[in-house]
Amino acid sequence: METRERLKALLKSRFPRGLRVALRTLQQEFQAMRLHRQGLRQIRAYRGRTSLKLNIGCGPNQKPGWVNIDLIPNVDLSLDMREKLPLEDGCATIVYSEHFFEHLDYPVDAKHFLHECHRVLERGGIISIGVPDTRWPLEAYFGLQDQEYFQFVKKYWHPGWCQTPMEHINYHFRQDTQHRFAYDFETLKRALEECGFSNIHHREFDSGLDTARRKKGTLYVDAHKP
């Protein structure tokens, strides 16, 4: 830890902030590549299997009996979802993703991901996506007499520096640059349709599937592969 702090101090003294940010990004991409290569080795255990249930972008919310996928250590498959999903066509019955899709750049990476999900799903298979509901904060901002959104996120989600409504709106959209795109139902529905999905509908929170702390403020959408 001491060596790491000394290195950080050295970089700060020698390089401008912009270059330090670029170096951190490059380091993160090398880490992503290393983890993805690990996932490509792990994938051997799933060759030839069918009726898989994929939990993509799972983070700490791993589901028993599912294939838990994320670009982190200690999951079933550590994979970069900007790349081709190394699973066979039609091998899955359901693809589930909660608070991951908004971390993909739109439209290229986001639609690549949806096309890959469509490919690995069997006919009649379901994709179920949960993303931050952007309609709620925008309606709250333009109707400032309704303070429920701002009170809720200040208490449970957003950092202390978020004080004004616009600071909260910015954090919703960017989340320290981790959020890449914001969705409402119309936009998510259109992206799913363009990638071949049908019977697209908003659904309610499902306590047997979704994360309890995300019940409020999440847009959940289901779609089917024809």
Image (cartoon, helix red, strand yellow):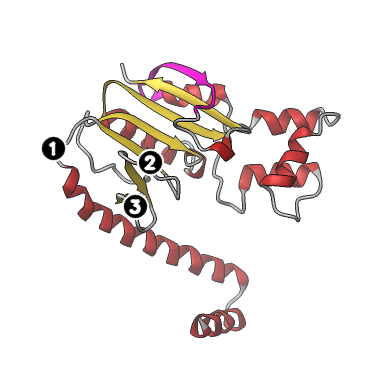
**Looking at the image, is mark 1 or mark 2 nearer the viewer?**
2
Residue at the spot x=71%, y=42% of the render?
Answer: 153
On residue 48, the disc is 1
State the residue in front, 219 or 109.
219
Label 2 to label 3: alpha-carbon separation: 10 Å
| Mark sitting on residue 133 | none
Crowd tier of the residue under label 1, counting other residues whose Cα lies within 10 Å: few below 14, some 14–19, many 20 or above = few
The residue that label 2 is drawn on is: 63
Q: For numbered disc 2, what is the local secondary structure?
A: loop
Asked whether, in this view, residue 213 is left or right of residue 160, the answer is: left
Mark 2: which amino acid? Answer: Lys
Asked which secondary structure carries label 1, the reply is: loop
Residue drawn at 26 percent across, 58 percent down:
38
Residue 131 colored in magenta in the image: no
At 49% across and 69% down in the image, what residue appears? 23
Bounds of the magenta segment = 194-206
Residue at label 3?
75
Q: Earlier in the sequence, mark 1 or mark 2?
A: 1
Q: Residue at x 52, y 20 (%)?
A: 202
Viewer-closest of 16 and 214: 214
